[in-house]
Image (cartoon, rainbow, N blue to C red):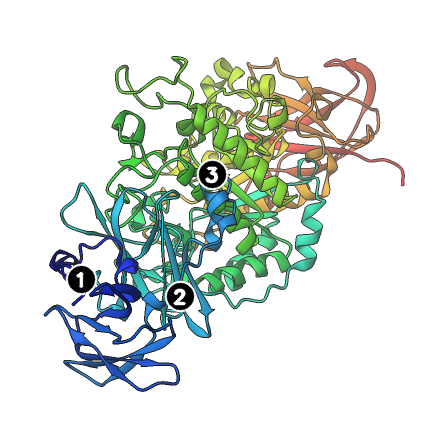
Amino acid sequence: MTLKIEEIKAISNGEHGDLFSVLGLHTVFVDKKEKLTIRCFRPDAKSISIIPDGGKPIKLERVSDEGLFEYVFPRRKNRFTYKVEVKPYVGEEYTIDDAYRFGPQLTDFDMQLWGEGNHHHAHKFLGSHTKTVDGVAGTHFVVTAPAASKVSVIGSFNNWDGRIHGMRKYHEQGLWEIFIPHVTEGDVYKFEVKSLTNSTPFKKADPYARFSEMRPGTASKVWNSSYKWNDAKWMKARENTAHHEKPVSIYEIHPGSWKRKVGEDPGFLNYRELADDLVPYVKDLGFTHIELMPIAEHPYDPSWGYQITGYFAPTSRFGDPDDLRYFIDHCHREGIGVIVDWVPAHFTKDDHGLRRFDGTALYEHEDPRQGEHKDWGTHIFNFGRTEVQNFLISNAIYWLEEFHVDGLRVDAVASILYLDYSREDGEWVPNQYGGRENIAAIHFLRRFNEVTHEYFPGVLTFAEESTSWQGVSQPTSSGGLGFDFKWNMGWMNDTLAYMEKDPLYRKYHQDQLSFSLIYAFSEQFILPLSHDEVVHMKKSLLSKMPGDDWQKFANLRLLYTYMYGHPGKKLLFMGGEFGQWNEWTESQSIDWHLLQWETHQGVQNLVKDLNHLYQQENAMHQVDSKWEGFEWIDISDADNSLLSFIRKGKNPEDYLVFILNFTPTYHDHYKFGVPEDCEYEIILNSDSSFYGGSNSGPTVVKGEKGHWHSQSCHIIIPVPPLAGIVLKPKKPV
């Protein structure tokens, strides 16, 4: 026996933090003579022999009851390769390769980038990766846990025993690694972590796992993709798309509740079924993009995916990662882009997740005034740590690279930017300059946008940012955050507040509709009517509308017409396209049965026509972020709650006139200014019977010379109640 009794006990008890220094082949001195020894630890083994390549089996001596075996070669011997033959107490004899005969697998380049916080592809070496080393197939595991005293890989391949596969530590980088032969795709595993502050080891899912067990299971899975993409044409065209001048109309969905299988619990459609059912539906309605609420692995369905444990693992609720690839590929082949909600603002406190991963606040802050979201019961990332920067930037790259995602919508950006977000005095820690801005987070967001756009031209980033922070969608080179688009939360709040008012009182609040044009061109905006507006007792969009049922539907159609005429790209949450009555819940499908009624069909018809009109008419999308694309006709008739404006394309001859009546009053002859004395065709009337309206209003109207509303010409036109109409000049062909 060449080990001290203390080391034998440490190995046997699972407390030895450097098993590579004692297990496998090692040079030892016995009676001052240099010799070679081999040691193996197998708790299930009755006896162990090693089989040197080209040699005969050599039986090892048991040196502990717990399963430590050793053999000292009688004469000096060079190192050699070998296999381990195990005769277990129970079951058949088996032969394996010893994990402790393989040397380090990490490259100096990876470790340098990791240490700098500049590793944009950390997912390619952290986590679990099948590979072949010295002709032996297995899986290479790497994890960061700088404060851990020991980390082991546990799984079905070692009876979840943390004593067997303790990892090698790289102290300067805080990384741990081990190559385990024979572990292959589909095997489940966790990391068992022992820290200096905890006497009991704790079990963690792999932060970089690419697949996970279905909840309530929490283990990670070894996974390889075998998917062959068929979207090269889409990906090439995407690189050169000027999205700010193109129509962007987004259908936001929660994959678990868009549609469910009847009679099954939970009845989720898998990714491939969604491809077959959702994509043609979205294409027919004319949306350009699908936005998926978070699809990274999460333990709790009612979190909607916003409290994540597996940032690199598409949730197993809807299939495996290649099923998701199929869904996105299918979208691309049908001309639909895919945006994914990305959540770097916070993470769940579940014990198997990132929380106190190595016994310390590795991903979060130690101080709860910095590291805890009390509103959501989650932890905040410590954006100043290199481990966090590597983790999150690599995660963004992973979704764009591995899944061909077209855009990332960053959730809760305001909570990232401000140290005092949703906190009272004394509950937050100022930055080094005494301010409330999170300087490390600002640097992170800018770096995120720079890196993603550098690697993937044509990919879009969206900020759900609810404050007046300046330059969210401005380039980082000019001091901005670098996002492509910002959600226009001000427009959403003001518009819905106005629409919820009884039309009798709207005349006192017309500024709520006009105010958004004061700042409409300060950012590149998305106009969102998202899931956040139809949950938590806020009512559905249809239920928010005032009046009887007829007025509710008319108001909703008017809201959509106004939204599509207003500068900015568009987003609508599922169910809104046909006027769902109920609030959304993640626990069931949206109310598809409503489409048996003509009123709901009418709303759906309107959304479809608005989308197609939005794509066809340059005036509705080409100049979204400059005053040159918009001109008020009349903003002053608050008594009648009427608004009118012109939308313009790059070509001055390319324009549309929008007239919006926000009361149920019918105006038989109303005079509006227009640019020309030509004929105007009514190309959309939200009061059409096709949409469920009263079918009042003209189809064509003739412009006349004579100044009105600062225009050189005018029209006299009947205006339908609670309706929006869109006029297009008829020009000679």
**Which of the 4 image quarters holds residue 156?**
bottom left
Q: Which residue is mark 1?
A: 3
Provide the residue designation for mark 3: 117
Instruction: Depth check: give the residue in front, 273 or 379.
Output: 379
Between 677 and 70, the residue placed more toward the observer is: 70
Q: Which amino acid type is marked by label 3?
A: Gly
Q: Secondary structure at mark 2?
A: strand
Where is residue 529 shown, x and y percent of the image? 48, 36
- Per the model, the C-alpha gap separating discs 2 and 3 is 25 Å
Quick one: label 2, few (<14), some, or many (20+) residues within 10 Å? many
Seen from the viewer's position, the closer of residues 549 and 323 is: 323
Q: Could you say where residue 341 lies in the image, as x and y percent from the top left?
A: 46, 43
Q: Is residue 21 above or below residue 345?
A: below
For label 2, the residue is 139
Decide which of tag 1 and tag 2 comes sooner along the chain: 1
Secondary structure under the numbered disc 1 in the rendered image: loop
Vertical arrangement, residue 616 with respect to residue 522, above or below: below
**Residue appearing at x 40%, y 51% in the figure:** 296
The percent position of residue 72, horizontal first and vertical second, equals 23, 72
Precedes in sequence: disc 1 or disc 3: 1
Of tags 1 and 3, the one toward the viewer is 1
- Residue extending farthest to the right is 733
Q: Indicate the quadrant containing the N terminus: top left, top right, bottom left or bottom right.
A: bottom left
Q: Is residue 470 above or below residue 324?
A: above
Q: Earlier in the sequence, mark 2 or mark 3?
A: 3
Residue 638, picture quadrant: top right
